[in-house]
Amino acid sequence: MINRYVVAAFIAVVSSGTWAHDSHSHGVAAQVDYAKAPQTAFGRAADPAKAIRTIAVEMTDQMRFMPSQITVKRGEVVRFVPVNHGKVMHEMVLGTSAELYQHSEMMKKNASMKHDAPNMAHVAPGTNGVIGWQFDKTGEFFFGCLIPGHFDAGMVGKIVVIQ
């Protein structure tokens, strides 16, 4: 399993909705200081070990997430465990609808672009990843697989954050 954390500078870029075009390692990256994790429109990174609950999210080569809709309470720390049941690479990326769409379009133009951030897990076939997240605002947020072609094929899900 690969740790999916990056240095604070890249976290700031991701949280602003701007995605880097250069190459970032998928190897072991710097540890995140969760107390200093930046706020995004859809919450902030949280220590998965402190999660209130764990939600397994299955990913398949039929370009689907199961479950495709998740409800969480505002303030809840969730440990997502994306599990790749397919034979190709998949990823789970948390974000707003606009951010996921923008990043998906960028990935089409830069298919070799590598990126790591606390809101994403790249999951090889037959393995799983981990994302720790705290949703501190109510509303609808999303998760998607941004590997070129997967998002367009419908590999997207919804997170509903309730009071």
Image (spheres, grey):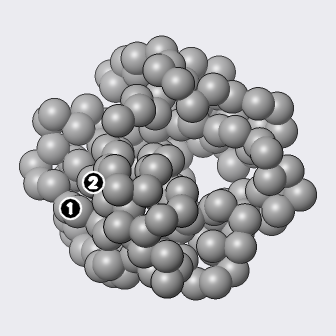
Residue 60 can be seen in this image = yes
Q: Residue at x 80, y 53 (%)?
A: 111
Q: Is residue 116 above or below residue 163?
A: above
In the displayed structure image, the side of residue 35 where residue 7 appears, left or right:
right
Q: Residue at x 41, y 21 (%)?
A: 32
In the displayed structure image, the side of residue 133 where residue 44 appears, left or right:
right
* Label 2: which secondary element: strand
Mark number, residue 21: none
Q: Is residue 9 above or below residue 38?
A: above
In the displayed structure image, the side of residue 15 where residue 43 appears, left or right:
left
Q: How many marks?
A: 2
Query: Residue 57 in the image: x percent, y percent?
Result: 30, 66
Label 2 with label 1: CB-CB less than 8 Å: yes
- For badge 2, the amino acid type reads Val
Q: Is residue 83 above or below residue 50?
A: below
Tag 1: Cα neighbours inside 10 Å, few (<14), some, or many (≥20)?
some
Quadrant of the frame with the C terminus: bottom left
Dot 2 or dot 1: first in sequence order is: 1
Query: Residue 118 in the image: x percent, y percent?
Result: 46, 38
* Label 1: which secondary element: strand
Quadrant of the frame with the N terminus: top left
Instruction: Please identify the quarter of the rendering in which residue 65 is found.
Output: bottom left
Query: Residue 117 in the image: x percent, y percent?
Result: 53, 37
Residue at label 1?
55
Q: Closest to the observer: 12 or 147?
A: 147
Pick out the residue farthest to the right: 109
Residue 157 can be seen in this image = no
Instruction: Please identify the quarter of the rendering in which residue 55 is found.
Output: bottom left
Q: Residue at x 11, y 54 (%)?
A: 53
Q: Closest to the observer: 85 or 114?
A: 85
Query: Residue 136 in the image: x percent, y percent?
Result: 33, 52
Residue at label 2?
81
